[in-house]
Amino acid sequence: MMAQKKFHMGWFLNFTVDEWTEPHAGLGGNPWNGKFYVEVGQMLEKACFDYMMIEDKLIVSEAYGGTSEVYLKHGLMAPKHDPVPLATTVGVMTQKLGVVATISTLGYPPYLLARACSTIDSLVEGRFGWNIVTSAEDFAAQNFGMEKLPPREQRYEMADEYVDLVNQLFDSWDKDAVVLDRESRTYVDYKKVRPIHFKGKYYSCRGPLNTVPSPQHRPVYVQAGGSPRGRDFAAKHADSIIAVANGVQEMKAYREDIRARAAKHGRNPDDVKVLYLISPTVGATTAEAKEKFRRIVEHPDYIEQSLALISFITDIDFAQFDLDKPLPGKLTTNGESGSLDKFQQWGSGKTLRQLCVDEAGGAVSSIELVDSYANVAERMADAMAEVGGDGYLITSPSHRVSRRYVSDICEGVIPILQRRGVVRTEYTGKTLRETLREF
Ligand SMILES: Cc1cc2nc3c(=O)[nH]c(=O)nc-3n(C[C@H](O)[C@H](O)[C@H](O)COP(=O)(O)O)c2cc1C
């Protein structure tokens, strides 16, 4: 039998409260000094993950029931702290792990973003990534002086121009501009640094950047485009794509679509690593995993929190629908369309309550994984063999991370995958881009 190609592993993290209400609540709701997430990063590095990706939102939502009550009461998506300093801290406290921070093109002027990314990439010695998001909520737009979010097509048009500008800023310094020549007392050869005089439809910038070229020159780009326009954007720019899909066939189709689009943009499709979100619930035995899953979905707050989460990322108020009936019609959103489609399972006839229960396995899980360590590992490997690549991003159920959950994956599932030879057992590259392109 031919050996299976290795696949990549990432972790999708929220800089929010930990599992503070659970019996096993080590941190008790106080992760804000970041030390816990540094430990998580070190555990991921030990398990040879490619990167930790920290998502971000820039609002306190009122999408569910027209009030912030549920979000703030449960600490659900709010409070949420800035991923940029956390990614930097984790990067400085690790040696090989990639660190990816979400930064919104809506909020940051391109010059500041390029400068911050370049600075961090130097600080973490070439292991930084930028998760490119445009923000997807009207409240976010209102935090930045706009009344409404531009429609999706226009957001992506703006983001395309934004990324072009940022790329030009990174290229405003030649790789060898820093000469450090003691004899002529020359630090930088000024002929190798140029303004860009960028004038676009939405942005303009003089340049050049005022940072030295970082080890990767430009950070790794990560993106999560679900719509056709989003996929095109991701295929054009991203080194790695965060994807949600419903099962193996959809995963395969999504990846093939991305690879075709990447080729159309003149890129090598192998340079774009599609990582699928999964949210395994694991135990020593199948029965133990099922019991854990039952505890999650039967928790008294579970349904309300699920609905609040899906309301948050779609800007649709799910409090308006009857829990024990199917949704009244197919819903659409200017927010996360892929996540909405995955959640609503249109045509399935399931009640809203059932959709919430399915979500634990989850809205963010591309394949259902509630089983023993061994069975989950086997299913992950088999599904990836069918899809053809490129890997998974783990996210904890209900956005609540705990040391125990990270240990379940890193010390329970990963060693089995490593013994099977399908995931990394060592880092050979120095930068995150090299790590991603190793296989
Ligand atoms: C799995 C996943 C993770 C995402 N993470 C973020 C995030 O951290 N911050 C954010 O503002 N948007 C995030 N998004 C939203 C996307 O960047 C995008 O704006 C949104 O999905 C709408 O575009 P689309 O319809 O092309 O998917 C995420 C989307 C998905 C599917």
Image (spheres, rainbow, N blue to C red):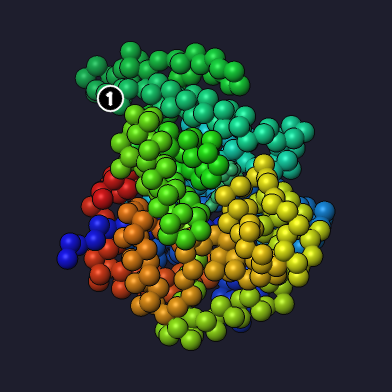
Residue at 54%, 60% in the rendered image:
364
Residue 107 appears in which quarter of the rendering?
A: top right
Q: Position of residue 323 (x, y in %)?
A: 76, 68
Does 64 sit left or right of 296 as displayed?
Answer: right
**In this view, 288 is above or below 109:** below
Residue beneath disc 1: 176
**In this view, 291 is above or below 348:** below
Q: Nearer the viewer, residue 397 or 366?
A: 366
Q: Nearer the viewer, residue 351 or 259?
A: 351
Q: Position of residue 139 (x, y in %)?
A: 74, 43
Q: Amino acid at mark 1?
A: Asp
Q: Position of residue 195 (x, y in %)?
A: 45, 15
Helix, strand or loop at label 1? It is loop
**In this view, 305 is above or below 265:** below
Q: Position of residue 220 (x, y in %)?
A: 40, 41
Residue at 69%, 52% in the rendered image:
330
Residue at 23%, 52% in the rendered image:
428
Residue 11 in view (yes/no): no
Badge 1: few (under 14), some or many (20 or more) residues near its Cα, within 10 Å?
few
Does 315 sit left or right of 297 as displayed?
Answer: right
Residue 159 appears in which quarter of the rendering?
A: top right
The quadrant the N terminus occupies is: bottom left
Does 283 sit left or right of 217 as displayed?
Answer: right
